[in-house]
């Protein structure tokens, strides 16, 4: 389990807050920023991007994951999520699943209010009994193993 220090927490919250400032949310007017601490110790920010065809938008967490994957890492150590409302911003169900794909149940997730105040929960607390590669049916495992042979950085099932 990654030891999330107060200094790293501040850095992640600040990065998520900065990303939130770049969100594109003209429809909901609910700006969200996220930041992932990659396995390479680089912080990868992301912001929500809405679209007039509403379900076609991207959540901030998904944006941050894409940013990280594009740079090369396939795992992250911690994440922060901040919205523009008065309550703690939590990842939606789909983003919890996406976060699990690149983290694990012990990964710390910093949930922030708009002012930066926060609480920390593990991904396992946010997504109990998560579905991951180990739950894939046996007939899918050869496909995953072939992919992993080409990409050894992908988590083993």
Image: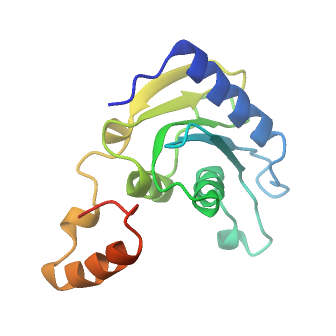
Task: Count how many numbered circles sit on residues in the image.
Answer: 0
Residue at image position (41%, 29%) is 121
Taking the view exactly as shown, the residue that stands out farthest to the left is 138
Q: Position of residue 88 (x, y in %)?
A: 57, 29
Q: Nearer the viewer, residue 48 or 76?
A: 76
> How was this image coloured?
rainbow
Q: Nearer the viewer, residue 89 or 149?
A: 149
Question: Can you say whether 63 is above or below 108 in the image?
Answer: below
Taking the view exactly as shown, the residue that stands out farthest to the top is 6
Query: Which of the 4 image quarters holds residue 69?
Result: bottom right
Q: Position of residue 50 (x, y in %)?
A: 76, 62
Question: Can you say whether 92 is above or below 116 in the image?
Answer: below
Query: Which of the 4 image quarters holds residue 68?
Result: bottom right
Residue 141 lies left or right of residue 77; in this view the side is: left
In the rendered image, the quadrant that contains the C terminus is: bottom left
Residue at image position (14%, 79%) is 138
Residue at image position (30%, 42%) is 105
Query: Which of the 4 image quarters holds residue 123?
Result: top left
Q: Position of residue 77 (x, y in %)?
A: 46, 38
Q: Nearer the viewer, residue 110 or 133?
A: 133
Residue 83 lies left or right of residue 27; in this view the side is: left
Q: Position of residue 137 (x, y in %)?
A: 17, 77
Residue at image position (51%, 51%) is 92
Residue 58 lies left or right of residue 75; in this view the side is: right
Question: Can you say whether 12 is above or below 134 in the image?
Answer: above
In the rendered image, the quadrant that contains the N terminus is: top left
């Amino acid at each position: 389990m990654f030891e999330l220090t107060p200094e790293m927490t501040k850095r992640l919250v600040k990065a998520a807050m900065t990303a939130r400032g770049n969100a594109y949310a003209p429809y909901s007017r609910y700006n969200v920023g996220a930041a992932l601490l990659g396995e390479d110790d680089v912080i990868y920010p992301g912001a929500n991007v809405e679209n007039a065809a509403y379900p076609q938008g991207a959540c901030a967490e998904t944006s941050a994951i894409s940013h990280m994957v594009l740079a090369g890492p396939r795992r992250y150590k911690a994440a922060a999520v901040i919205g523009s409302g008065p309550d703690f911003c939590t990842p939606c169900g789909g983003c919890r699943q996406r976060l699990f794909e690149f983290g694990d149940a012990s990964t710390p997730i910093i949930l922030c209010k708009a002012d930066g105040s926060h609480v920390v929960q593990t991904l396992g607390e946010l997504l109990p009994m998560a579905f991951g590669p180990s739950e894939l049916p046996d007939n899918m495992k050869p496909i995953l193993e072939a992919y992993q042979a080409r990409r050894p950085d992908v988590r083993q099932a």
